[in-house]
Amino acid sequence: MSDRPLGAQISHALKARGVEVIFGIPGVHNVELYRGIEEAGLRHVLTRHEQGAGFMADGYARATGKPGVAYVITGPGLTNIMTPMGQARSDSVPMLVISSCLTRPDRHMGRYQLHEMRDQEAAAATVTDWSLTAPDGPGAWRLLDRAFAEFAATRPGPKHIQVPIDVLEAPAPPAPRPPAAPVRAVAPPEAAARAAEMLRAARRPLFVFGGGAAGAAAPARRLMARTGAASFVSFAGRGVIPGSDPLNFGSYLGRSEAPGIIATADLVLAVGTTLSECDMWRPHLGHDCPMIRVDIDPAMLADEHRAELPVLGDARAFLEVLEEALGAHRAAPGWTAAEVAAARVRMRAETDAERPHIAPICDALREVLPPETTVYSDMTQFAYVALEVWDMEEPGRWHHPYGYGTLGYGLPAAIGGKIGLGDRPVIAIAGDYGFHYTMQELGVAVELGLNLPILLWDNGKLKEIEHWMEQSQIAPNAVVARNPDFCALARAFGARAAAPRSRAALQAAVTEALAGDGPTLIHMTAETAS
């Protein structure tokens, strides 16, 4: 391909690097990026807001394992997508945002031009792994290859490449062939040998698996069986060990009983987890024994959760080597299924008492959803309960805005996930207030004909915030907003709608929605639990 405008060639370079879908909104500054989209054979999804584009890219990436890519304009386009970028950074999601920026002579000049920011590159750097400017065509290709190399080999996260308008418009040489992808760091054999020695000496080993262990489910399950270990999983790690495993305490790390349980272990192995505030709601895990910690991010190995054996490397590779290093070892079980089951009953009861009416609906939904269903949830009380009581049998099937905790995630992320997963079932769960943030993206689901059930939990207020105010002895205020007729709103977009008032009716509505030819909003209230 002869030299053509760089903007027209970026889509070709992305296609050569495995990208299939772009989420975004065209504008006068980034229009050159759109010159090459169709020619390159890429699919473009026009979103209703750049925040929707970012969350769709996030949902697509979580569903497929491929980087989610978005095109946005200078200034407001970038600031609108910065919230999803922050969420992607918090949850280790591979995302690439390509934006325009002012021409090279105009950057940082303070002339109050269209879409001008004082320092767009620096602004995006606050919510990304890095934010850099492509000075020319060769510089753009180097940044692209750096992004994809890091997606493959390091802890995933969002990257931002901005291209000045004059650079987008200028002729540039075509991108070189993609380089070979690097492999992830593998821990040295001596680390596995030391971990095996510690495991052989343990009588009550306890694993804690996070989202970073999602690709390590097979060796993790074999190790659990061989060592008689019990486990907890973080919210992002649900499914690494099946919820049905008799020695799996589940995702109850934040429950009041969890520290006492963990304190009875004589060895803790934390694999692919940040041991974050949002999983535990306390500063310390609760153990009083040695810890082995495995993570791809060295920063995690130097945080306050200090381990006797910190291991830098890929979780799956390390657990496979650990299996081999254990030899024929099979431990006499120090944990019993009865103690785990009893603890789970107590912790579920605590969850149910905190936020009544929701757990029975979760049970009813689990009964009718196909086992391969992927769920995207928003920041809502329904999700907070489900993250604890809804066991997963496989990893990577429930996605939530865990750390950054942004409202408005569920619907657009589910749209991106559905685009990535095709015929596989996907559902979205949102609360009434959070739905307001991105409800305009319902138009995208209608436009694309996605058979996407959207479960809307309506308690008529920001009930979780009201609860926190009451706990803090603050008279609740600013927690009630006027809601629309959500079913009428959905129909106005061209979607279906249902308002079941019993669990049986809810099950029927979800089953029908999964078989439909477009999105269905399913309006739920506490009355649905009857």
Image: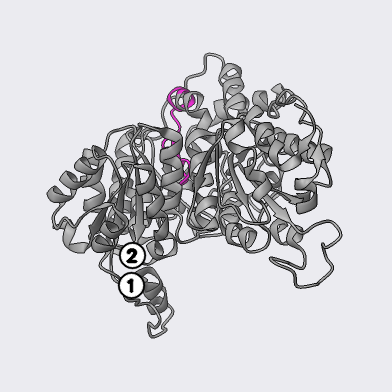
Q: Is residue 12 covered in magenta?
A: no
Checking the image for residue 174, the label placed there is: none
In the rendering, at what x and y percent does residue 357 appear? 22, 60
Q: Secondary structure at mark 1?
A: loop
Q: Amino acid at mark 1?
A: Lys
What residue did someone put label 1 on? 461
Q: Secondary structure at mark 2?
A: helix
- Which portion, as a residue range, is magenta? 222-240
Residue under the point 56% across and 49% down:
24
**Is the N terminus in the top left, top right, bottom left or bottom right quadrant?**
top right
**Is the C terminus in the top left, top right, bottom left or bottom right quadrant?**
bottom left
Q: Nearer the viewer, residue 22 or 321?
A: 22
In the rendering, at what x and y percent does residue 181 appear? 70, 26
The reply, left or right, for residue 288 in relation to residue 520 is: right
N-term mark: 1 or 2: 2
What residue did someone put label 2 on? 432
The reply, left or right, for residue 220 in relation to residue 121 is: left
In the rendering, at what x and y percent does residue 448 appear? 39, 43
Q: Is residue 399 visible?
A: no
Is 109 situated above or below 428?
A: below
The reply, left or right, for residue 344 in relation to residue 222 is: left
Q: Count all numbered tags in the image, as a single digit.
A: 2
In the rendering, at what x and y percent does residue 438 appear? 43, 60
Q: Residue furthest bottom?
A: 475
Residue under the point 36% across and 57% down:
430
In which quarter of the view is residue 225 placed? top left
Mark 2 and mark 1 in contact (Cβ < 8 Å)?
A: yes
Q: Is residue 230 covered in magenta?
A: yes
